[in-house]
Amino acid sequence: MNRFISFFSTIAFLLFFGISTNAWSEDSTRVLFVGNSITYFNEMPQLFRSIALNNGKNVSVSMYAPGGTGFVNHYVDPNVYALFRESWDVVVLQPGSGESAGASWPVDTTIYRGRILLDSIYTYSPCAKVFIYEIPYGVPSENEYNVYFSVQDRIRDSITQLSDSMGIPFLPAGQCARAYYEMHQNLLLHGSYNDIHPNLNGSFLVASTFYAGIFREQVSQTTYYSNVVPDTAAIFFNIVDTVVFNHLNDWRLNTFNLSADFSANITGGDVTFSNGAVNAASVEWDFGDGNSSVETNPSHTYASNGEYWVTQFAFQNGCIDSISKKITIATVGLSQATT
C-alpha cells in the first residue's frame, strides 16, 4: 500500500466516544474511517479488516464516527484534526446522509468543507490514499423501490461531483447495494423499511466493496463471511467484483491516487509484464526469483517451473505503492495470464 518514504513513527490512541482502534505495527496498512452511524453500524470497519486479513493483508483500522454527523461537523471538529495529525495509509471520508444527496447542504458547500479536511490529511500523510464513501440509501417502503433508486442516483451524482472536485476516488458501496436490489427486492440489506442504516448483510456488502476498491483486488476469493450465510456472501462478492472492476473509471479508481498494477503474459518460462500503474512516474519490479528490473514493461525468463510472487513498485513525488501477484511457470509453450 501507499507509504511516504520518510515513514512517520508512532500513534497516540484516542479512547473517547466515537473512536475505536486496534493495535497496529509498522508493517500494517493503517486505515482511518471518518463518518457517522452509517460507518459504525455492525462494526463495518472491523468487517473490512477481517476480509483484508483473510486475504493476507496486514491491516489496522481506526474510526471516528459520532452519530448524526457529516462534513459540516467534521471540518470544525478538533478531534478529527487530532487524528489527521497521525500518519495514515488510507482515509475513508463519509459525508452525512443529507450531504451525500446534496439535500442538507449544496454540494459546492460540502466540497469546500471536504477540501479543508483533505488539506489537513495530506499535510501529515502526504502519500495517503483518500476515498469518499458513497453510502447505500434505505428503502422507503415495500412499494417505493422506485424512490430508493431515484435517491441512490442522486447520491451517486453528488458523490461523483465531490470526487471530481476534491480529486479523490469514491468507493461505490451504494451502487453495489443498488445492484442487489435491482435483482432482488427483498430488503436483505436493511433491517426494516425507511431505515437508512444497513443490517449485517448490508454492512458486509459495504466492507467487501471497500476491500475491492482500496486494494484494487477482487474479493471473490474471500473465505471470511462473518455471520453472513456463505451463499449470500458469495452473491455479494460477485456483485462487488462486477460493479467495482467493470466501472473503475466511473468511480475514479483509475483516475486519482497512486496505484501499482500490472498484468503478465506467460509462455513457458518467458513472461512479458504490462505496466498498469496509475499516476506513477516510474516503476520497479521484483520477479520473485532474485532478479529485478526498472523497465516500464519488462520481459523476464524464469529458469525453472514453479510459483513466483512478482512485486511491482510504483513511485511518484516521494510516494511509493506496491502490489504483488503470484504467477505460475509450467510447461514450455503453455500460455497463461494473470488478471
Image (spheres, helix red, strand yellow):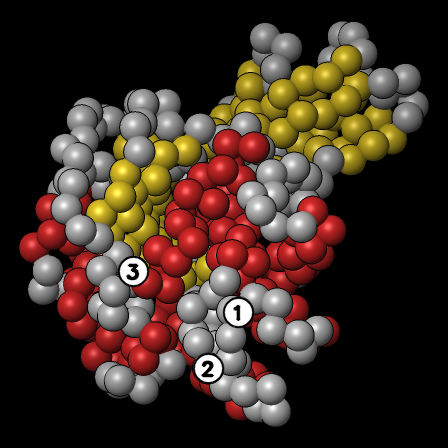
The foreground one among 104 and 328 is: 104
> In which quadrant of the rendered image does the N terminus lie?
top left
Q: Is residue 306 left or right of residue 299?
A: right
Q: Residues within 10 Å of mark 1 (few under 14, many from 20)?
A: many
Q: Residue 221 carries which label?
A: none
Q: Which amino acid does label 3 sit on?
A: Gly
The nearer-to-camera label among 3 and 1 is: 1
The nearer-to-camera label among 3 and 2 is: 2
> In the image, residue 263 lies at what x, y percent?
67, 38
Q: Mark 2 points at which residue?
A: 194
Q: Residues within 10 Å of mark 2 (few under 14, many from 20)?
A: some
> How far is disc 1 from disc 2 in space, using C-alphas?
9 Å
Q: In this view, does 310 lie above or below 222?
A: above
Q: Is residue 127 above or below residue 23?
A: below
Q: Are marks 3 and 2 in contact (CB under 8 Å)?
A: no
Q: Which amino acid does label 2 sit on?
A: Asn
The foreground one among 58 and 278 is: 58
Residue 149: image quadrant is: bottom right
Q: Is residue 304 above or below residue 80?
A: above
Q: Residue 190 carries which label?
A: 1
Q: In this view, does 90 lie above or below 155?
A: above
Residue 117: image quadrant is: bottom left
> How far is disc 3 from disc 1 in space, using C-alphas?
19 Å
